[in-house]
Amino acid sequence: MTISGCRQKMANQPRYDSLEASAFFQDGMSARPRIPGTVARGELVTNPVLETGKMNGALVDGFPFPVTMDVVNDGQRAFNVYCSPCHGRAGDGNGMIPSRGYRRPPSFHTETLRAAKTGHFFDVMTNGFGAMPPYKTMIPARDRWAIVAYVRALQLSQHATVNDVPVGDRAKLDQTTQAQPEHGVAKPQEREAH
């Protein structure tokens, strides 16, 4: 008894290699352009402020979700990983990368950047600017907004006054200031106590 059947060799299926010419299509290309009006999976923008930092083409000045302490902490974590190598931990532009000869980024503490809209920071992280590459594919949108929140916290920390502290907490500042040694050096009696 003889059994016969169809056998298709999967390894020899008709296919095109990347950018191979094609006689089938009129333009001679095997790589097909996207059909107008289609959106690839993961590219649909349902919340333009969250995804672009803009509303009706203009940069926003605010956040697409409430900023909590958890958001700022997440922003600090992401900032320390992605941003501090160039911008420095304090956001002053004195990171390790510029210290090795690369272009120094601007300090976040200049008047221009302190007055910049939050959408500006988000847009620069998303699309890049000058020597800074785009981080859209590396950092999710929500984390980019968390970084913006942390940058705002850094800016406030470098330019805060006593008037920025709630009245009920100002007494704590006085206690903290009195407990710290001058110029960061412990006095002899303080060294012995430790």
Image: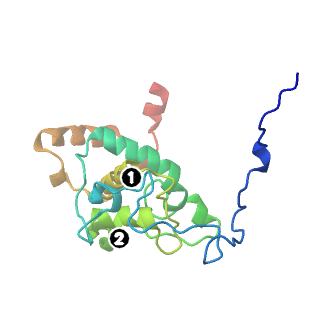
Name which of mark 2 and mark 1 comes first in the sequence: 2
Q: Is residue 87 visible?
A: yes
Return the residue at label 2. Answer: 110
Q: Which quadrant of the view contains residue 122?
A: bottom left
Using the image, determine if residue 57 lies above or below residue 168. Answer: below
Q: Amino acid at mark 2?
A: Thr
Residue 68: image location, x then y, percent = 26, 41
Q: Which mark is residue 186?
A: none
Q: Callout 1: helix, strand or loop?
A: helix
Q: Nearer the viewer, mark 2 or mark 1?
A: 1
Which residue appears at 47% of the width and 26% of the height?
A: 194
Using the image, determine if residue 44 lies above or below residue 20. Answer: above
Q: In the image, 146: left or right of 30? A: left
Residue 19: image location, x then y, percent = 69, 68
Which residue appears at 35% of the width and 56% of the height?
A: 148
Structural distance between the alpha carbons of marks 2 and 1: 25 Å
The residue lying furthest to the top in this view is 1
Q: In the image, 147: left or right of 111? A: right
Return the residue at label 1. Answer: 141
Counting labels gives 2
Which residue appears at 59% of the width and 59% of the height?
A: 96
Q: Nearer the viewer, residue 14 or 176?
A: 14
Residue 116: image location, x then y, percent = 29, 69
Q: In the image, 131: left or right of 64? A: right
Q: Is residue 181 visible?
A: no
Q: How is the image coloured?
A: rainbow
Q: Nearer the viewer, residue 82 or 18?
A: 18
Using the image, determine if residue 171 lies above or below residue 123. Answer: above
Q: Are marks 2 and 1 in contact (CB under 8 Å)?
A: no
Q: In the image, 27: left or right of 57? A: right
Q: Amino acid at mark 1?
A: Ala
